[in-house]
Image (cartoon, coloured by chain):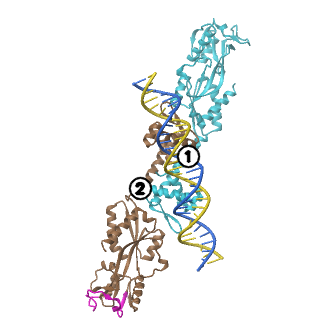
Chain colours: A cyan, B brown, C yellow, D blue
DNA sequence: GTCATGCCTAAGCAATGCTTATGGTGGAGG
DNA sequence: CCTCCACCATAAGCATTGCTTAGGCATGAC
């Protein structure tokens, strides 16, 4: 089997006209070149070089090899350069999957920084909610998934992240959302969740709802959910209209213009943990690693 | 430095979808593949593979490498095939330089056999007399030189063949050429060279002439050379016309229609040695080696 | 639950490849 | 004419590489 190393040496010999010159060009000793050529000739099955008294000439087979060597080594150099560009963040791709409130808050800053500091990289985004977005990650359809979980809630087995790299970004506190004219509105103290036991509830997305119910039951009541929608603006709109109360993550509220509602801190304090997920191997891909760092920074600025 | 071996393994992994499959395809064990990929990823500076629970996927860098690998390995295979063709006598070139009487006698048969048994090879011929043709060999302008020398004559230093491979082909006996009506013609016994001391002489090429003079002087006389020509038909023509006698190699006479002359064996018997010359390295080039064998065969059939 | 498949790691071993040291050869210059 | 220099080949020593076998662990199928 001919190896690239052989071709490099042969080309150097053809260029330099002697083993010694080739050795100097390659930064090794002359016997090393001599041995390489011997091995190459052995695997070629025919002499490649004619040792003239004055100069080193190529045989026909040697000329053929050198002729091919240029193309082969050029291809190899191109491949190395392309990989080096990816490794050096002069190129590379990061595909992110994120849930809406993450997309509107953490992602923009991280993306902007990435574009600015590493213009060669390509960042792309798809919107996806946690269970699906994690499947996408495992299926290879994205490189990083922004997801969240409730640390105090037992995780279903099928949603385990044991096989993933979990990079915590921030603890997103849950707050109560009540109509502005609600008796509890405006107070600076935290409100007991149980104080909302008799309210009508507006629930968010399915995951959030499950968590809401769990949370309330720990406090001794079952929330009466009359209205359900995944759309956060709709939730605040319904609350503002006095149709009920809700619990929303701060992150979700941040990008909402929530007229007519008041937010209240809850007791016990509950957080959802927002994390970035990736596959163990992908965590070492430079562009992915850098994007994770950018996301972490974006989260820190918001902590 | 990326080596061809790495690309072969990477491509096998990409094709097979797992290290084990690649190992089977490559005829080695799975840890070998695993180690190769580890080394390649290390030299690439970024992961190339994503170990999914079910299948092995490529990262972007891995895809880039595989994309280049096809071209690179194809080029390498083409190079190997071209060299193998030369090594296997399915291709290759032999450039022969020969003196006229060799060209007309030994070369045709050897060339014909070469063309027939190894149709892929190219044989070419240039006409050149020994001192020049040997220089051509050393200068790389031909691969084999047909030459001759007089073993009993001291060789001038500048015509030494010490640095060459000398393959003896045949001993070409020198014969006397006399007019058909000459008193010595027709006898079956060998003629003493001294018996021709008083004749007028027709000399051949410069080398032959030098040798003729030397030969005669050993026998006690200096030949009286009136006519000199390098052209063998001219020599026999002049002899036939009764203008003198000559000494010619049998090989030269063979392809001459020599009307009007008779040949006589000489005493002492003298030969010129016809040899094939090549450079030590070229002697191992298959096409050259085969051509030398063909020339030897052609000479044997004529011995 | 058990088995099969696939990957990783470790350890042993052979082969590769580089080095330094040495000898031989051909050409150039004193 | 002889010496010196540049170049190549070879040998021995040594570090590295690369392969193997053996064993362990995780995952998915029957």
Q: Residue farthest to the bottom?
A: B198
Q: Which of the 4 image quarters holds residue A144?
A: top right
Q: Identify the residue under disc 2.
A: B84
- The range drawn in magenta is B179-202
Dot 1: chain letter: A
Question: What is the residue that sits farthest to the top in this orientation?
Answer: A198
Image coordinates of residue A60 in percent, x first then y, are 44, 61
User: Residue B134 versus residue B292: which sits nearer the camera?
Assistant: B292
Image coordinates for residue D26, horizontal then vertical, percent = 52, 28
- Residue at the spot of label 1: A80
Residue B241, above or below A268: below
Q: Would residue B209 appear left or right of C28 to someone viewing this image?
A: left
Tell me the element at label 2. Answer: helix
Q: Which mark is drawn over residue B287?
A: none
Q: Residues within 10 Å of mark 1 (few under 14, many from 20)?
A: many
> Camera-side residue: A251 or B86?
B86
Instruction: State which mark lies toward you, 2 or 1.
Output: 2
**The magenta stretch spans residue B297:** no
Q: Quadrant of residue B126?
A: bottom left
Question: Chain ID for label 2?
Answer: B
Q: Residues within 10 Å of mark 2 (few under 14, many from 20)?
A: some
């Amino acid at each position: 089997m001919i190896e690239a190393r052989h071709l490099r040496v042969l080309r150097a010999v053809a260029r330099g006209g002697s083993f010694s010159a080739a050795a100097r060009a390659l930064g090794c000793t002359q016997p090393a070149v001599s041995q390489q050529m011997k091995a190459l000739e052995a695997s070629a099955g025919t002499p490649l070089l004619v040792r003239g008294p004055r100069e080193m000439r190529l045989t026909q087979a040697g000329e053929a090899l050198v002729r091919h060597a240029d193309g082969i080594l050029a291809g190899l150099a191109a491949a190395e350069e392309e990989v080096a560009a990816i490794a050096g963040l002069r190129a590379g791709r990061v595909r992110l999957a994120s849930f809406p409130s993450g997309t509107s808050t953490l992602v923009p800053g991280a993306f902007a920084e990435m574009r600015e500091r590493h213009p060669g990289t390509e960042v792309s985004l798809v919107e996806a909610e946690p269970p699906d977005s994690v499947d996408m990650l495992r299926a290879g359809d994205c490189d990083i998934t922004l997801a969240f979980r409730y640390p105090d809630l037992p995780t279903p087995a099928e949603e385990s992240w044991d096989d993933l790299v979990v990079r915590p970004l921030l603890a997103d506190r849950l707050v109560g959302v009540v109509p502005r004219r609600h008796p509890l509105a405006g107070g600076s103290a935290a409100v007991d969740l149980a104080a909302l036991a008799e309210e009508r509830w507006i629930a968010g997305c399915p995951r959030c709802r499950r968590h809401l119910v769990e949370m309330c039951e720990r406090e001794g009541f079952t929330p009466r959910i009359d209205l359900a929608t995944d759309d956060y603006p709709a939730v605040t709109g319904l609350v503002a209209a006095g149709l009920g109360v809700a619990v929303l993550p701060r992150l979700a509220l941040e990008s909402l213009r929530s007229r007519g509602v008041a937010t209240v801190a809850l007791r016990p304090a509950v957080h959802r943990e927002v994390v970035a997920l990736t596959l163990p191997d992908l965590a070492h891909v430079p562009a992915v690693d850098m994007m994770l760092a950018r996301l972490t920074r974006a989260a820190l600025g918001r902590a």
